[in-house]
Amino acid sequence: MGIGELMAISIGVSMDAFAIAICKGLSVEHAEPKHLLAAGLWFGGSQAIMPLLGYILGSGFRSAIESLDHWVSFVLLAAIGIHMLRESREPVRKMDASFAPRVMFPLAVADSIDALAVGVSFAFLKADILPAVLMIGLTTFVFSVAGVKIGNHFGAKYKARAEAVGGIVLLFMGVLILAEHLQT
């Protein structure tokens, strides 16, 4: 997996966090540096940990389904992408203005479930996991910080677009993986 593909996947999985961060930015009257840092660390950290866990899980049963790994990767990425596209059509919900761990932890875990599935795909693709989780975590950190700032300034109009773009990117990556394998 090349750096361009890894960057595209990193951006794709970070779009949910970006959308949530926009909503968190909407929820506070003034976005302070502590809000930006909290969103970046919670979402970036969870988006880095979950693919690592998925990779470990996927590595455990990769050999059992190696002949189907490209299909599994395609299905996982396509399902996540379709889910994100559906979410992009839902109305924006008002969020709790708190950035406390009791609020951020469940948001970060719920947001990063798709990254767990991406980690399983990485195991099947035999991707180098360390650079992948670092890039996903850093990309999500940056998008989350920007999301809080944007949400605080501009409102909810970017949430749906962010989720739709993320969904399209993940669908595209799934199709690319499948097409690449079918050509060999």
Image (spheres, grey):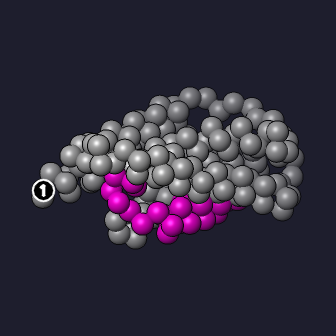
Q: Amino acid at mark 1?
A: Gln
Residue 14 position, x and y percent, is: 55, 53
Image quadrant for the C terminus? Answer: bottom left
Q: Judge left or right: residue 69 versus residue 88.
A: left
Residue 80 position, x and y percent, is: 44, 39
Q: In the image, which residues are magenta?
A: 122-148
Residue linked to disc 1: 183
In the image, residue 88 above or below residue 59: above
Dot 1 alpha-carbon crowd within 10 angstroms: few under 14, some 14 to 19, many 20 or more? few
Residue 120 position, x and y percent, is: 42, 48
Q: Nearer the viewer, residue 115 or 162?
A: 115
Residue in the image at 60% along x and 65% along y: 138
**SS at circle 1:** helix
Q: Nearer the viewer, residue 51 or 137?
A: 51
Residue in the image at 48% along x and 38% along y: 84
Residue 47 position, x and y percent, is: 59, 52
Residue in the image at 33% along x and 56% along y: 125
Q: Is residue 67 visible?
A: yes
- Give residue 34's quadrant in the image: bottom right
Image quadrant for the N terminus? Answer: bottom left
Residue in the image at 49% along x and 58% along y: 10
Quick check: is 131 in the magenta stretch? Answer: yes
The secondary structure that most of the magenta stretch takes on is helix
